[in-house]
Amino acid sequence: MVLSELLVKGRKMSLSSVLSLETGELLKDGSFSNLGKLGFFTTSETLVFAESEKYFLKALENPLVSCVLVNPEINVVNDSGLLKGVLRVQDPHETFMELNRYLAQQGFFYPQLKSSVHPSTFLAPSAVIADKNVFIGENCQIEDHVVIQPNTLIGNHCIIRSGTVIGTPGYEVFQSKGMNKVAYHSGFVVIGDNVEIQACNCISRGLVPSRNTILASEVTTDNLVHIAHGVEIGSKTRIAANAMIAGSVTIGENVWIGPSAVISNGISIGSNAEVTLGAVVTKNVPENGCVIGNSVIEHKKFTQFFRKHE
């Protein structure tokens, strides 16, 4: 199963329909096919939320955005020049999250299909596969006590070692009626061919289908790796034990992530880069870069510093 085949095509919803579900003020109607968080999607006709004027202006400039949820404090000029649909609501973040749940449960993004495992794949007796929206390709090996939750697509010739959980809801907390609530996750985990996941990994699905968690072909992980929602990992990347990759991180091809490395959310790491053991990455790493330390600095600067002080 290819993800593009699963997603519903051509379905749209208007902002005026959202208004029927939520109290607010419609400044200009519009329609959308997807939900997304600014900076982390590549789909057209996408609805986003903006909690400040800075991000509202970014939404207006983004050609992929068709509709915006804004709070009452943002100054919006309501005239014929407004090219995006705009809906004022009391809490744009909360409305976005609740809309994500509602649309997923209504089948707006994709249908609920019976799970499918290719006959050539070995499925251990104690492995647990969700009844809906799990698709596993040819000649895979799914070991004991693996749990694969809905919205998981696994390619061919993959190995999933014991105790790993794939497709968990990610961890994004928002305020709903004054209480903390973990967001519903409607996105997917998409795993390419020849991927090997060692024991006791946890891989979360995307928050929305416009930003899924993706492990490309020949990605390998060691034991006890955590990969959060919306992480995209390029082919042949290797991730060592206890690494923690936070949400919406983008990792290129043939990258080395060392043991116990921590990568902060939204970071980009270029192809052929190296993140050494125990590194805490809080800013982007260029292609062929090598970083070390807490928080990280370039490896050459680190070694030069210590040579001067030997």
Image (cartoon, rainbow, N blue to C red):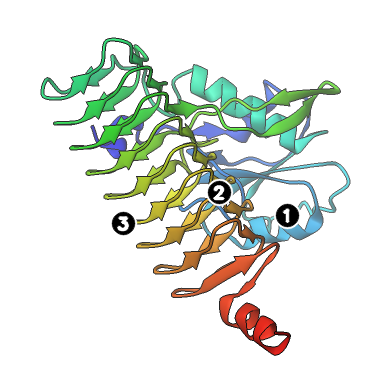
Q: Earlier in the sequence, mark 2 or mark 1?
A: 1
Which label belongs to residue 248? 2
- For the residues labelled 2 and 1, the Cα–Cα distance comes to 20 Å
**Above-or-below relation of 220 to 159:** below
Percent position of residue 289, x then y: 50, 74
Tell me which corner region of the image, top left, top right, bottom left or bottom right, holds residue 207: top right
Disc 1 designates what residue? 56
Quadrant location of the N terminus? top left
Discs 2, 3 touching: Cβ within 8 Å: no
Question: Badge 1: how crowded within 10 Å, few (<14), some, or many (20+)?
Answer: many
**Above-or-below relation of 102 to 247:** above
Quadrant location of the C terminus? bottom right
Percent position of residue 64, x then y: 51, 54
Q: Disc 1 or disc 3, which is closer to the eye?
A: 3
Q: Is residue 162 visible?
A: yes
Q: Residue at x 15, y 23 (%)?
A: 118
Percent position of residue 125, x then y: 27, 10
